[in-house]
Amino acid sequence: MKTIYLTRHGQTLFNLQHKIQGFCDSPLTELGINQAKIAKEYFIREGIKLEEAHSSTSERAVDTLEILTELPFKTHKKLKEWNFGTFEGEGEHLNPPLPYNDFFVQFGGEDQLEVEKRLNEAITKIAAESSNEQILIVSHGGAIANFYRKWENYSQVRREGAIPNCSIFKYEYDDGIFVLKEIIRHDFSSIMPK
C-alpha cells in the first residue's frame, strides 16, 4: 500500500490578484511561503517520513515542494495546471460557471477530460513505478480537482468547495486504484494579513 500526499502550491501573486493561472506562472507570496511552512509542520507533527517527491514543472509548485521537504525531487509537465489558453493571466471574473468542460478549447486551452486524463496518467505512473510508500506530489487546484473527479466514486471522503492553497489530499494507492482517505486543510489564521 502506498500513500500519495497530493498537495496544492501556496498562494501566488496571481491568486492574490484573482488572475487565471494555468500554464502561466507567478511567484509565491509571503503568505504562500508561510502556508507551505505550516503544511510542512503537518508532516512533522504526524510523524510522516516522506520518501519521494514530485512536482509540476511550474515554479510555484517547485518552490512549495522545496519548503515542504529537502528530498531530491523530479518535475513533470503532466502535473501542471489546466491550460486556459488565451485566458491565462486574465481576471478570474472571466471564468465561465463550473464545470468548464471544453470551454477553453476554443481559446487554445485544454478540455476538462484531457486534464483529467493527463493528471491521472502522471500520478498513476509515479505511484506504480515507485518502490517507496510515502510519496509527496505538489500540483495545482484545478489539476487536483480533476484527479479527484476521476477517483471520487472509490472513496467515502468528499470534497466541498474550493481547494485551499497547500491543502493535502491523502490518497492510498493499491492495485491500480486511488482511494481518498483524508483532505487536510490547515489553519492559516495566525499568518493571515490583519
Image (cartoon, helix red, strand yellow):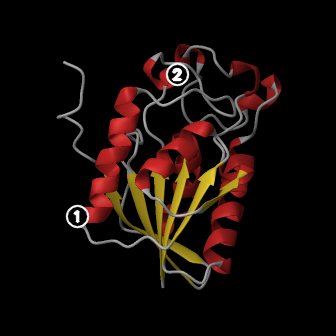
Badge 2 amino acid = Phe
Residue shown at 52%/22% (left/top)?
Answer: 14
Q: Determine whether, in the image, residue 146 is placed left or right of residue 83.
A: left
Residue 164 location, x and y as percent? 38, 40
Image depth: mark 1 or mark 2 in front? 1
Would you name the residue on which mark 1 appears? 45
Badge 1 amino acid = Arg
Residue 23 location, x and y as percent? 69, 34
The correct choice, above or below, for 187 with respect to 151 in the image is above
Secondary-structure class at tag 2: helix
Instruction: Tell me the CA gap for discs 1 and 2.
Output: 30 Å
Residue shown at 46%/53% (left/top)?
Answer: 7
Say which quadrant the C terminus sits in: top left
Residue shown at 45%/68% (left/top)?
Answer: 171
Name the foreground residue: 76 vs 124. 76
Name the foreground residue: 162 vs 80. 80
Q: Which mark is residue 14?
A: 2
